[in-house]
Image (tube, rainbow, N blue to C red):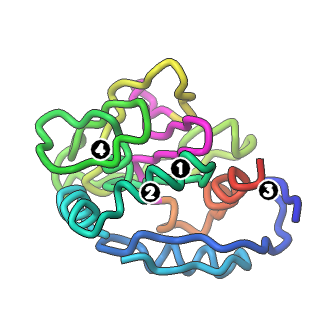
Amino acid sequence: MQSAVGDRRPLTARAGVLGLQGDFAEHLATLDRLGVEGMDVRGGESTTIGKLASQYGIIDKLKDRVAEGMPVWGTCAGAIFIAKEVPGHPHPLAGLMDMTVERNAFGRQLDSFEADLDVKALGEAPFHAVFIRAPRISRVGPGVDVLARLGDGTVVAAQQGRLLATSFHPELTRDERFHRYFLSLGKS
């Protein structure tokens, strides 16, 4: 089924949500509202995600599926997991996206914040983003498109082909545009 990002028609698809830790239930609920069958794939903070993904052979399987064209979206700790470089992070990474990500770049849990972002790929209306112990995308490679920046220029959303990374948690809002955008990557 063809659907534009702002289209409210239900989508028909299946999407896996790595559910080791974090807001995976909210992602699944958003996908359900969109008419997408969400599958809870057992994930957590970047260290836990990397260790478990390595232990269970998920990294190699994920790389194979990405090579076959499967879209992948990393939110917050997931963005760390799919990055090629994370300074000071000795744990396994999928290393899928040509970017450098700094963990907890905005501070601790108490330093969490919200911001309205200009995301041209989602249309004219700003996207209200929730940042919780968020990473910062400090470098993007030549094949990576920046989708959103904070007012100070800090990159907080990027895309490389069918790979998507956000430093914030779109699933904590009722705005489904990022989820719709991600789902559209599987159709291109």
Q: Bin the neighbour count of mark 1 within 10 Å (Cα to Cα): few under 14, some 14-19, many 20 and up.
A: some
Q: Which comes before the other along the chain, label 1 or label 3?
A: 3
Residue corresponding to mark 3: 6
Question: At numbered mark 3, what does the secondary structure look like: helix, strand or loop?
Answer: loop
Relative horizontal placement of residue 51, taking residue 98 as reference (left or right): left
| Direction top: furthest residue | 142
Question: Tag on residue 88?
Answer: none
Query: Are the two marked residues, 1 and 3, in contact with CB atoms closer than 8 angstroms?
Result: no
Q: Residues within 10 Å of mark 4 (few under 14, many from 20)?
A: many
Q: Position of residue 134 (x, y in %)?
A: 30, 49
Q: Which of marks 1 and 3 is in front?
A: 1
User: Which of the two labelled residues, at mark 1 and mark 4, occupies the earlier sequence position?
Assistant: 1
Which image quadrant for residue 174? bottom right
Quarter occupied by residue 99: top left
Q: Is residue 100 above or below residue 26?
A: above
- Label 1: state its secondary structure: helix
| Mark pair 1, 2: CA separation | 6 Å
Question: Contact (CB < 8 A) between labels 1 and 2?
Answer: yes
Could you classify mark 3 by the number of other residues whose Cα lies within 10 Å: few (under 14), some (14-19), or many (20 or more)? few
**Which residue corresponds to mark 1?**
66
Please give the residue where the numbered disc 4 appears in the rendered image: 135
Element marked by disc 2: helix
**Amino acid type shown at disc 1:** Val
Point out the tag, 3 or 4, that comes first from the N-terminus: 3
Q: Is residue 95 left or right of residue 177?
A: left
- Upstream in sequence: badge 3 or badge 2: 3
Task: Give the position of the N terminus as an image quadrant.
Answer: bottom right
